[in-house]
Image (cartoon, helix red, strand yellow):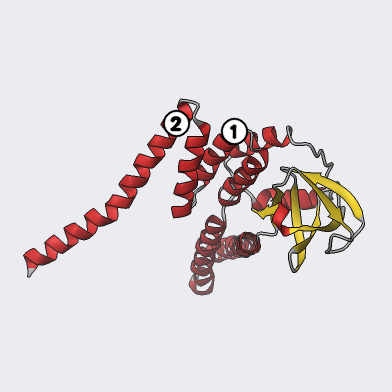
Amino acid sequence: MKVMRKVLYILVAVFAAVPLWASQQEWEKASALYADKDYEGAAAIYRELLNKGESPELYYNYANALYKTGNLGAAVLNYERALRLDPNNEDARFNLDFVNGKITDKIVPIERFFLYEWVDALGKVLTTNQWAWTSVVAFALFLALALTYLFSRRRWLRKSAFFVALFLFVVSAVSFAYAFSTKRILEERADAIVMSGSVSVKSSPDESGTELFVLHEGTKVTIISVVGEWGEIRIADGNVGWMSLGDIERI
């Protein structure tokens, strides 16, 4: 029985390793094609790998290949997806800014109060899981120090424990808020990229609506609401209108 069990464990390990090995082979093949300037071939392999599982590195490489093929909208979309999973991916951020400089629409964002900018920037420092773990660890330390405060007989230790515990409680609460907020954003996927070359944004969710403005491939929008096959969108300068959901793809 012991021998059979060992054989079973070995077989399970081997079969579990096969997909990883195959994916690594495909990754290396795509990298080789990219190096040989076969960008369409590389993009096709990266797309297949993404069908098996997403990662910021895959989205980043896929976006690079798409940009080289001249597909700016899809490149922007996948750089954004890389940053959705890893907000600290500086390479993806740099390339996204570069490609955004090449798209048609140059939308000037509404200037916001600086505190909102700071709050948003802080939220991008860590991923959702990292914020969650920070909250858990800070809360555990808070509990430990709270017990120290309650049961220690040394005045200086109780005083120190009180203030540090208070600080850790705030850290835990803020981290939890960021974890919840970033998780909600990931699940809602309200942001999208215009994938069609040129799209008329309407005043109502139908073709008979008045044309308000025109958006072009690669522009980022936020979906506010959905009616059938139409989405009410808002762009960075605050303008709002309706466009077909078939012309955009969610990040």
At x 53% / y 55%, what residue is drawn?
A: 130
Residue 19, percent from left and from top: 32, 51
Kind of element beneath mark 2: helix
Residue 152, percent from left and from top: 49, 70
Q: Quadrant of the N terminus?
A: bottom left
Question: Which residue is disc 1 drawn over?
Answer: 69
| Up/down of 161 relative to 110, above or below | below
Amino acid type, mark 2: Leu
Kind of element beneath mark 1: loop
Task: Indicate left or right for 104 with 155 as reference.
Answer: right
Of 108 and 221, the residue lying toward us: 221
Task: Indicate left or right for 212 with 116 as reference.
Answer: right
Q: Residues within 10 Å of mark 1 (few under 14, many from 20)?
A: some
Separation of residues labelled 2 and 1 (CA atoms): 13 Å
Task: Indicate left or right for 34 with 127 as reference.
Answer: left
Of 113 and 192, the residue lying toward us: 192
Q: Quadrant of residue 182?
A: bottom right
Of all residues, the one furthest to the bottom in this rendering is 150
Question: Badges 2 and 1: C-beta atoms under 8 Å apart?
Answer: no
Question: Which residue is disc 2 drawn over?
Answer: 33
Looking at the image, is mark 2 or mark 1 earlier in the sequence? 2
Q: Residues within 10 Å of mark 2 (few under 14, many from 20)?
A: some
Residue 8 visible, this angle: yes
Of all residues, the one furthest to the front in this rendering is 208
Of 20 and 135, the residue lying toward us: 20
At x 64% / y 33%, what residue is drawn?
A: 70
At x 55% / y 35%, what residue is drawn?
A: 65
